[in-house]
Image: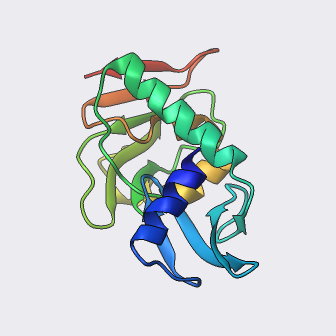
Amino acid sequence: MIREQALAHLKALGARPGETVEFSWFIFRLTETAGQLDIEALDFQQIASFTKDFRRVDQIHSAQMQVLREEQAAPAFCNLRQVAACSKSYAPGSPHAFISRVAGAEGDQSGWYVGVVDDPLDVHNPDNVGIKSLYEISIKDRRLLPYWLLPPGYRVVFEGGQPEVFRC
């Protein structure tokens, strides 16, 4: 699905093997297979690790589009290289985690904050907040992947069985 769309678009632009490109929310690396332009996607397992298997990319893209449809929201694009502010109380898989889109993406900032409900730390103290790339967060906590394209004003809480999406 997305692989074919991206490959056709990149061929039309004259892309060449060895280039790394952003397409929608994803990062692809152009390669050559049997003399033809081909692409690889980040594998969502390790930093800077690529694969030709696009099943995970298709699953992520489908889940992101489903969330946007359910919320009747237009995507507010950010990318995997951009960073989110993270409470130092947050740990991947935390049963009390939440994400909140506080601003639109700009430069290297995604506009996302990752925290925990009833955080014991003072999150207004910069010593209690760190910066992590969306990719680093995503490979360690895949629950967050479907929600990264939500626009500012959304909060997703991961307490209980199903994530709850709130428009603030």
Q: Front-most of 55 and 107? A: 55
Q: Which residue does the image show at 39% across and 40% down from the upper left?
A: 149
Q: Position of residue 101 (x, y in %)?
A: 32, 39
Q: Is residue 117 visible?
A: no
Q: Position of residue 3 (x, y in %)?
A: 59, 54
Q: Quadrant of the C terminus?
A: top left
Q: Position of residue 79 (x, y in %)?
A: 42, 57
- In the shown orientation, is residue 62 left or right of residue 74? right
The image's colour scheme reads rainbow
Q: Give the answer, above or below, for where 168 lies relative to 11.
A: above
Image quarter of residue 51: bottom right
- In the shown orientation, is residue 127 left or right of residue 136? left
Please give the count of numbered marks on the rendered protein. 0
Q: Which residue does the image show at 66% across and 37% down from the upper left?
A: 93
Image quarter of residue 42: bottom right
Q: Front-most of 153 and 122? A: 153
Q: Front-most of 161 and 62? A: 62
Q: Position of residue 125 (x, y in %)?
A: 32, 53
Q: Is residue 126 visible?
A: yes
Q: Which residue does the image show at 68% across and 51% down from the upper left?
A: 54
Q: Front-most of 95 and 120? A: 95
Q: Which residue does the image show at 45% across and 50% down from the upper left?
A: 86
Q: Quadrant of the N terminus?
A: top right
